[in-house]
Amino acid sequence: MSQTLARRPARESEFGYTRRLRGWFGNQWGKPRFLVLVTWGYIVWSIVPVLIAIQFSFNNSRSLSIWHGFTLKWYTSTDPNIDSVFHSAELRGALEQSMKLAGLDVLIATPIGVLLALGLARWRGRGSGASNFLMLFPLVTPEIVAGVSLLLLFSQLLTFVPFGTVAQLLGHVTFSISYVVVIVRGRLFSIGPSYEEAAADLGAAPATRLTRVLLPLLLPAIVASAAIVFAISIDDFVISQWLSNGANSTTVPMEIYDATRATPQPSTDGIATVIMVITLLSVVAGVLVYRFFTRGESGRGSAVDDVAGFGI
Amino acid sequence: MAGGEVEVVDLVKEFNEVIAVDGINLQMPGGEFFSMLGPSGCGKTTTLRMIAGFEEPTSGQILLDGHNMAFTPPHKRNVNMVFQNYALFPHLNVFDNIAFGLRRDKRPKAEIRRRVAAALELVQLTGFEKRKPGQMSGGQQQRVALARALVLQPAVLLLDEPLGALDAKLRKALQIELKELQQQVGITFIYVTHDQEEALTMSDRIAVMSAGRVEQVGPPQALYEEPATTFVADFLGVSNLMTATAQGESNGRCKVALGEFKLYASNGDVSTTGETRIVIRPERVRLEAHESTGENRIPGMVERVIYLGNGNQIIVGLAHGERIQALVQNTGDELAYRQGDPVKAYLPAEALRVLTDTGTAPLEDDPRAHAAVQPAEPVAEEASSPNVNV
């Protein structure tokens, strides 16, 4: 019986070609090729324009469409006729303003966010659920709305806040805190109360529990959230724009926006490249630090890994 | 270390209207291996956490060597705990984990080194100082947790199901080790578990808990041989619980009617009358040929024979309708009974016990089913029971 079965020839489809194509895509036992195709399609679609912009920041011509060979002059030239990234007053000023805002934002928003996360995680009772939910509000509020409301606040009510760096910084800190809270609170929930209890059991007073146990365990999440705050602050356009006072508080995204609307130059692509590299480095550094400190922890904080490590 | 006597007086803990611990009284003399045994939700872990200081009692006292410490914060109590998930600090290596408590106590460096080394030797982990907890097996982490607690030389060591996460074989080995360790260091161990075998193996005394109350306290043998309540009889080991009518005492034995059959029981509350529950352990049930006669013999039929390796579990349907289990040791001889055989089940009077409460504990082994049982009057019963060692 089995021999007859083995000798019987496999039945070929009449439409061998289409069937094979369908088999290549839709073979449920094989690789999910269709999903792979969609994924790569998306990656190419989203990255290629960025790569082209980066490429033309090295173009030996003012053209942003025809390649004339490689140069670094849009970054380093001191020629007054060329607005290079590191020597043109506007571009350099914008870069400094962006770095200053992002750096101060990290320094202010991270500690406040950590304290808020600790408080919210501990707070049990009336109002704690609502506050936990409301912490997510700045993440979902349209930035344009947040920007307008801060503008009105500083121009009508808190008139002692000067527009420019101070107002921009307050705006950045406002929305950055939520990111810190969400990431740190996630880590707090995943590490649970038992380490603190163990520390208390071993004779550690509340302050020691915080410094010797809780903060070291939260460190990866704190570093990751600082990196993310830095990245989103550097990227921010809307709030920086609303709360600026004109020329001397122009950030890189604002500068790029203005320059591109007037006369796009390779140096505009150049400063965009610089800012992208900085953002990327800060996020990668955050992920690496997170990874380094959580190595050897098995199966813990997978939710935090997704937030802080972007599932990498 | 001298002392280590723990006394719990009228301890109550309520969580938002839910009563987790409902006025329990326990006394644990220094140096005892004391277990709190019960299904999940019986209040055993909450009681332990109150002794450790992680929960604030709603009312009642916790006395350590005569001093009430119910409202002392955990870092000021001379008790240490081994957590269910060990709670080893993942950012510290084994040495720093064990030294953590000594450093909080500001001991000199040389003393810390010496005591950590001694603690590691005690749990047989010398040489593991530089490992991180994440690089160790569950059993090794367990030992580190033990060393970390014992290095502080507490008067009392609290253990919250410390073997729960380990596999069966390792658990057995560690049970014996834990008991030896306890005898070696000579301090009070308060051990929480839902595993009755674990409690029987290691404990000097066990408190069986249910629904926030203590059902019975006593040495393992007393609890197994002389359960005071239906719950204890059912929770500890396998029991044949039967509902019967007690017809009064004669010659120190209780005459009980089980359907149309009359039995004598010489254990437990023999003077009771009316509806009651009687219990016999499977290993005390004897199966005899159908023709045999004598008192305390009930005809039945073998419904099922289950091979256990070291014995056979035989389920017998008795003539009055109830089913009982009998355990026949594997002696190498072929078993005389097969499914469908008529037999006589001999329930010796000295193995039959009349229980004091007629509570309706379910016969299933599902602990959640036990937790749902709300014994209406166990505290009053317990107080009158001669078996309670509180």
Image (spheres, rainbow, N blue to C red):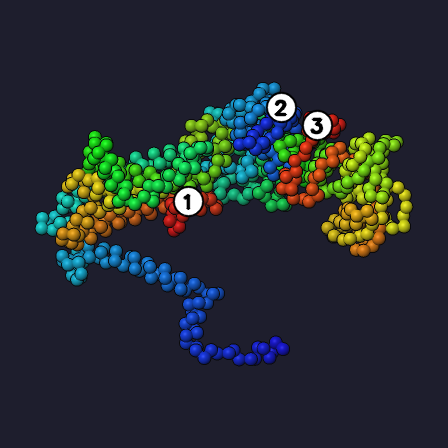
Marks 3 & 1 on one chain = no
Q: Chain of mark 1?
A: A
Point out the frontmost of discs 2 and 1: 2
Direction from residue A287 to residue B148 in the image, left or right: right
**Neighbourhood count class around disc 2 (C-alpha, 10 Å): few under 14, some 14–19, many 20 upward:** some
Point out the frontmost of discs 3 and 2: 3
Direction from residue A81 to residue B166 in the image, left or right: right
Whether residue A290 is visible to the viewer of this picture, yes or no, is yes
Q: Give amino acid for label 1.
A: Val
Label 3's element? helix
Q: Is residue A1 above or below residue B349?
A: below
Q: Give amino acid for label 2.
A: Val
Q: Residue at x 11, y 51 (%)?
A: A82
Label 1's element? helix
Q: Are marks 2 and 1 in contact (CB under 8 Å)?
A: no
Tag 2 residue: B9
Q: CA distance from mark 2 to mark 1?
A: 44 Å
Q: Give amino acid for label 3.
A: Ala
Of the image marks 3 and 2, the number of the one nearer the N terminus: 2
Residue A206 appears in which quarter of the rendering?
A: top left
Depth check: give the residue in front, B76 or B110: B76
Residue A304: mark: 1
**Neighbourhood count class around disc 1 (C-alpha, 10 Å): few under 14, some 14–19, many 20 upward:** many
Residue B380: mark: 3
The N terminus of chain B: image quadrant: top right
Q: Are marks 3 and 1 in contact (CB under 8 Å)?
A: no
Q: Is residue B155 above or below residue B145?
A: above
Q: Chain of mark 3?
A: B
Label 2's element? strand
